[in-house]
Image (tube, grey):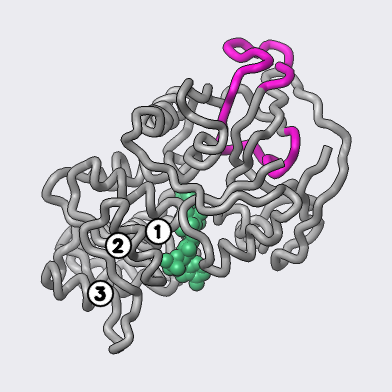
């Protein structure tokens, strides 16, 4: 089969397509013909070395497809079933081995592309809005990169929870997309007069008005975001798209208003099968019912994985990017 691998860490140029023997499922595993593989920022961190992985490394964590074989002891899945997953290394491939306990059924009415597009980013938006800081009517939140993969889903789930949603995005086209997806106020990071997103939020809501900032951009937005929080507000720094956030003094949190700071990761919010079935079930159910709009902003052939990484890291994507084997 054809698969995408890196033998050393580095830029997108280290990504190579290779022919490897078809994998075989061991006990408890499914062999799946991948219909679509999801591209996520974490794939770029694993490729670049920001998140170390053993080498050589087969890229990709997320996908959806059709079961072709089940390993010994697997119950609940059979060849022909449509399944999706967010955590099976080597998903940028024609065939993927997926532990059965990490696979979920794709409901009727949800396409394989949609399922692959919404597993990792959808469950992320789910835990951020329901558990890390459970939004409720009356809350004001800020979503950075509001036209991105996580961003567009986060905007919709924050709206679903009844919050007032502020969002940032890098271009007017992206801002329009975030607006049309439901964000109440969408602002640039920096406008032509030199005012930043914080000035724009303060002009609308006043100083220290936000209950929570959801920040997947990281280095370039973290400090200003902190300054917008109300006393005892929560900073959720959940990603490093512009680089990792530097060390923070606990005193800065005190001086900022007894703030809460958390750096969550999906895997700590999906710790067992009931968690996975509940979160993925909610997200896929909302897609099926038309309550959650999944925007697939790009679909590239598997062999163009390096281009997909360049587009994502170059801020040239909106919504989800998929690779098609
Ligand atoms: P996106 O589709 O959101 O792409 C990243 C976006 O970040 C870009 O489109 C861009 O939007 C914005 N951005 C701002 N500054 C930069 C920069 N210097 N370089 C690149 N992008 C920049 O990606 P994902 O939805 O896959 O991920 C979003 C974030 O969420 C990432 O940081 C990712 O690591 C994190 N994440 C964290 C998870 C967790 O559980 N902790 C799980 C899933 C994702 P714009 O041009 O509008 O600024």
Res 167 label: 2
Which of the marked residues, 3 or 1, is nearer the chain's N terminus? Answer: 1
* Label 3 environment density (alpha carbons within 10 Å; few <14, some 14–19, many ≥20): many
Q: Are marks 1 and 2 in contact (CB under 8 Å)?
A: yes
Residue drawn where x is 20% and y is 63% of the image = 258
3D distance between C-alphas at marks 2 and 3: 11 Å
Q: Are marks 3 and 1 in contact (CB under 8 Å)?
A: no
Residue 184: in magenta span: no
Query: Which residue in the protein does label 1 denote?
Result: 147
Residue 69: in magenta span: yes
Q: Is residue 64 above or below residue 263?
A: above
Q: Is residue 302 above or below residue 123?
A: below
Label 2: which secondary element: strand
Which of the marked residues, 2 or 3, is nearer the chain's N terminus? Answer: 2
Residue drawn where x is 70% and y is 54% of the image = 305
Which of the marked residues, 1 or 2, is nearer the chain's N terminus? Answer: 1
Q: Magenta residues, as a range?
A: 67-95
Query: Which residue in the protein does label 3 denote?
Result: 198
């Amino acid at each position: 089969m054809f698969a995408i691998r890196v033998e050393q860490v580095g830029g997108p140029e280290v990504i190579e397509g290779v022919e490897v023997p078809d994998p075989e499922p061991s006990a408890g595993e499914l062999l799946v013909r991948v219909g679509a593989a999801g591209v996520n920022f974490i794939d770029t961190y694993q490729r670049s070395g920001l998140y170390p992985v053993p080498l050589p490394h087969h890229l990709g964590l997320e996908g959806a497809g059709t079961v072709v074989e089940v390993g010994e002891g697997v119950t609940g899945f059979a060849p022909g079933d449509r399944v999706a997953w967010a955590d099976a290394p080597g998903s940028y491939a024609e065939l993927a081995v997926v532990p059965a306990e990490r696979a979920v059924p794709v409901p009727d009415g949800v396409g394989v592309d949609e399922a692959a597009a919404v597993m990792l980013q959808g469950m992320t938006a789910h835990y951020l809005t329901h558990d890390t800081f459970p939004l409720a009517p009356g809350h004001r939140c800020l979503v950075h990169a509001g036209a991105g993969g996580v961003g567009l889903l986060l905007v919709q789930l924050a709206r679903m929870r009844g919050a007032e949603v502020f969002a940032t995005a890098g271009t007017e086209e992206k801002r329009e997309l975030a607006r049309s997806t439901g964000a109440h106020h969408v602002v640039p990071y920096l406008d032509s007069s030199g005012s930043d997103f914080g000035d724009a939020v303060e002009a609308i809501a006043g100083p220290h008005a936000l209950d929570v900032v959801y920040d997947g951009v990281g280095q370039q937005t973290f400090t200003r975001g902190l300054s917008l929080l109300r006393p005892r507000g929560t900073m959720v720094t959940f990603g490093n798209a512009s680089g990792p956030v530097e060390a923070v003094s606990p005193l800065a949190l005190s001086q900022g208003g007894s703030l809460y700071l958390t750096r969550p990761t999906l895997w700590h919010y999906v710790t067992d099968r009931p968690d996975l079935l509940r979160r993925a079930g909610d997200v896929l159910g909302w897609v099926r019912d038309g309550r959650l709009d999944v925007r697939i902003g790009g679909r590239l052939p598997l062999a163009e994985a390096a281009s997909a990484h360049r587009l994502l890291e170059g801020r040239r994507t909106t919504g989800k990017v998929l690779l098609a084997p």
